[in-house]
Amino acid sequence: MMFASRRAVICRAILLAVVGLFGSASVVCAQDADFFDNHVLHRIDLTLNSRDWAALKVNFRENEYYPSDMRWQGQVVRNLGIRSRGGGSRSDRKPGLRVDIDRYATDQTFLGMKSFILDNMTQDPSGMHERIAMQLFAMMGLPAPREAHAQLFVNGTYEGLYAIVESIDKNFLRRVFGGNSVGVENDGFLFQYRWVRPWYFEHLGSNLDQYAALLDPVTHENASTVALYDPFEQMIRAINSGADDQLASTAAPYLDLPLFMRFLAVQSFIAEWDGVLGYAGMNNFYLYRFERSTRSQFIPWDDDNAFRALDYPILPDWQLNVLVRRALNVPELRASFVDSLLTAAALATTPALPGAPGWLEQEVQFEHALISAAMYADTAKPFTNEDFEAGTDAMVAFARRRSAFVRCEAGKLTGTVPAAAVCAASE
């Protein structure tokens, strides 16, 4: 079943009234916020040549685009482009999709957007890791893509449950950073990190090609290599140089370190297995360098592998990462990390109403109720319905017990809990 938001119901009522009075209507009701309304199970319909859909599945490892039309809440967008996407999540049975609104029609937009992602969630049996993780980032005051769930139909056939994910692009930057004294902040240098080998923020020398291999430009793609990557090389060199007690001043022109520690704390709380402290080095983030500045900021991406385990270490192999190791050696930055970690733990366990579950458990229960029928009907998913229920149970256990474990581990960092103490993952 697809549920409609109260705003959408009112809007449709107005639209029908206008049609009844005048025989036609040009009322535009939906906004991009409605498209990412995570209290709604959306329905998205794609219509394309059946041979193209079959070819996309056969060639799912390629990035070839295919023309398609899309319908959402009665709105139709024609002649957009879709292609297979993802890394380890690529699938021939349930392909993840990038939807480019203006691929074939120049300057075409949908609710002001040029693109969005349909995440197939093949690496997450619970179907809720991404959406809940990104909401926690936003609650912690960090820029993060908006997400919601949708049933995807292609040529009238149900293809499964997907997550709608906001693209990290200039529209996103405008939304999260807004205006400043000279205009809108969205024309800086945006990069997506590309995993090519384990990398731990070590300096790779002065050859800028080394850094170009790690960071794909999303904006200013045609800028020179020097314009794109020289400030990045300078940042890495500064963070790898000097004494720890000088780190705050040497890094300040390039990175807001307390803000980075908050980003790290959220990933630590949600037990992100494939992030900044990933199992194979850094992964899954965007880096935005602000306009007329050398300062950059991390933006989270692709949290399917969050919520790894309720007793997952808060700082796995942290000594390997130069940035994290040096920052944690600075007392003020370590305190900033701990404060943010405890804030995330408090947010997760704070109930909206007396006697209600904490926020995180409430979100898990709501999400399960919202998506379970669509997930059960999804025959393309690479796991069973029993796996889905087990994934949900694991999320409930995480919601109930992670905060206590995190508080104990944070106590070890601050010396308020003996280092030898066993942090039982229970409330």
Image (cartoon, rainbow, N blue to C red):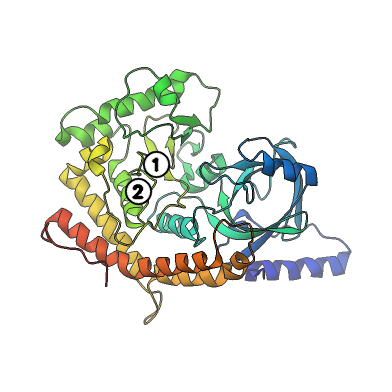
Where disc 1 sits, the SS reads: strand
Q: Quadrant of the C terminus?
A: bottom left
- Residue closest to the eye, 162 or 380: 380
Report, in whole angstroms, how far the alpha carbon at label 1 lies from the one at label 2: 8 Å
Find disc 2 in the rendering and name its residue: 263
Question: What label does residue 323 carry, if any?
Answer: none
Point out residue 48 in the picture as x, y percentages from the top left corner: 78, 46
* Residue 265 located left or right of residue 121: left
- Residue closest to the eye, 83 or 134: 83
Where disc 2 sits, the SS reads: helix
- Tally of marks: 2
Quadrant assignment, res 208: top left
- Residue closest to the eye, 177 or 267: 267
Residue sticking out furthest to the bottom: 355
Quadrant assignment, res 344: bottom left
Type of amino acid at the residue the image marks with label 2: Phe
Is there any visible trace of residue 101 in the rendered image? no
Q: Residues within 10 Å of mark 2 (few under 14, many from 20)?
A: many
Type of amino acid at the residue the image marks with label 1: Phe
Chain-order first, disc 1 or disc 2: 2
**Tags 1 and 2 touching, CB below 8 Å:** yes
Point out residue 411 in the picture as x, y percentages from the top left corner: 17, 59
Which residue lies at the image location 43% right of the left edge and 31% below the top edge? Answer: 196
- Residue closest to the eye, 103 or 364: 364
Which residue lies at the image location 73% right of the left edge and 45% below the top edge? Answer: 53
* Residue 317 located left or right of residue 301: left
Q: Quadrant of the N terminus?
A: bottom right
Is there any visible trace of residue 193 in the rendered image? yes
Q: Residues within 10 Å of mark 1 (few under 14, many from 20)?
A: many
Quadrant assignment, res 44: bottom right
Which residue lies at the image location 64% right of the left edge and 47% below the top edge? Answer: 112
Find disc 1 in the rendering and name its residue: 298
